[in-house]
Image (cartoon, helix red, strand yellow):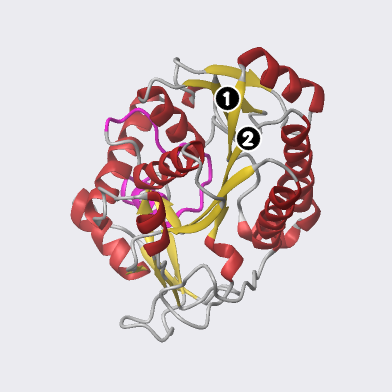
Amino acid sequence: MSVLVTGGAGYIGSHMVLALADANEKVVVLDNLSTGLRSAVDARAIFVEGDIADVELVSSLFAQHDVQAIVHFAGSIIVPESVSDPLKYYFNNTAKTRALIDTAVQKGIPHFVFSSTAAVYGMPERVPVTEDVALNPMSPYGRSKLMTEWMLEDVAAAHALKYAVLRYFNVAGADPAGRSGQSTRDATHLIKVAVQTALGLRQQMSIFGTDYDTPDGTCIRDYIHVSDLIAAHMDALNHLRQGGESITANCGYGHGSSVSEVVNAVRKVTGLPIDAVLAARRPGDPAAIVADASRARRVLGWAPRHDNLEEIVEHAFAWENKLITKV
């Protein structure tokens, strides 16, 4: 019996592979390496280069490795790119996932954990955000993820498939043991960008908008350590295996940090200067978005262990230094 991790060569997926392997699970990784790195996949996992929409390949993996659960990370994730190239996102995130779900149903896979996003909320009317607020994604990225949520809900009503949808907020940091981290070139994650700027890998960084209705005028986000996010995925998988009902749950800490606070935390942790220039707001950026993750805590038993901005920065900084030494 094994778990199929799609997108397991990517930032978040590679951490899922580590957690599963650490728990002595048999893991199969399927990744087309369009953005992921083969080197990011733990040696304990079986790696297959391929596409989630390749029905013949996916079917063979199910049979050959006795796959009983799918944890689905594969997809495109850059919001501005989704605006300029929406069809790429509806193809990669929606159409291909539809093919994966169809194959899973045809082959009787019982459990499906989907890595969704807070982008399905758009600009929420209240903060912290609960899972039952009106969904209003502002980008093709958010819409493509929401479409997958809808597909899973409808499929689970018609077939013997149970799912967990985890809507994660701003993921950051790296494996505390230094085994994996954010390695994607030209990544847009704020903490990675700030750390790279501190290290001189970027000449400067931008703070987009200083006139929001927040204490310091910059956007507030709920930054969650990647290891805590993966713990929620592990808890969700165990919930389904134990006969739990399908669930949609937020993954965040319930409090946020502003862009300025993040930049200052990076300055403090690294002891290095950061050239941060002020820039105009980006379209579609809400002033603040913070998770109400009480459902994940209550139903899944999720108990985050790394709820500390400076710790998140420390792990991101350590990983970036490790990447430098590899070059």
For label 1, the crowd category at 10 Å Cα-Cα, with few meaning under 14, some 14 to 19 and many 20 or more, is: many
The residues tagged by marks 1 and 2 sit, at their Cα atoms, a distance apart of 18 Å
Circle nearer the viewer, 1 or 2 = 2
Q: Quick check: 13 left or right of 84?
A: left
Q: Is residue 195 magenta?
A: yes
Q: Is residue 67 above or below residue 153?
A: above
Where residue 208 appears, as percent x and y from the top left, is 47, 71
| Residue 110 numbered tag | 2
Pick the front one: 179 or 231: 231
Residues in magenta? 177-200
Q: Quick check: 7 left or right of 219?
A: right
Which of marks 2 and 1 precedes in the sequence? 1
Look at the image and tell me whether residue 203 can be seen.
Answer: no
Look at the image and tell me whether residue 261 can be seen.
Answer: yes
Within the image, what quadrant is residue 73 found in?
A: top right
State the residue at coordinates (37%, 42%).
Answer: 231
Amino acid tagged 2: Pro
Task: Report the residue marked by disc 1.
Answer: 29
Where does the C terminus fall, quadrant-wise?
Answer: top left
| Residue 38 numbered tag | none
Where does the N terminus fall, quadrant-wise?
Answer: top right
Q: Is residue 60 magenta?
A: no
Q: Quick check: 126 left or right of 176?
A: right
Q: Is residue 139 above or below residue 229?
A: below
Q: Is residue 41 above or below residue 200?
A: above
Q: Is residue 291 above or below residue 155?
A: below
Where residue 239 appears, as percent x and y from the top left, is 45, 43
State the residue at coordinates (24%, 45%).
Answer: 314
Where residue 301 appears, as percent x and y from the top left, is 34, 50
Outermost residue toward the top in this view:
64
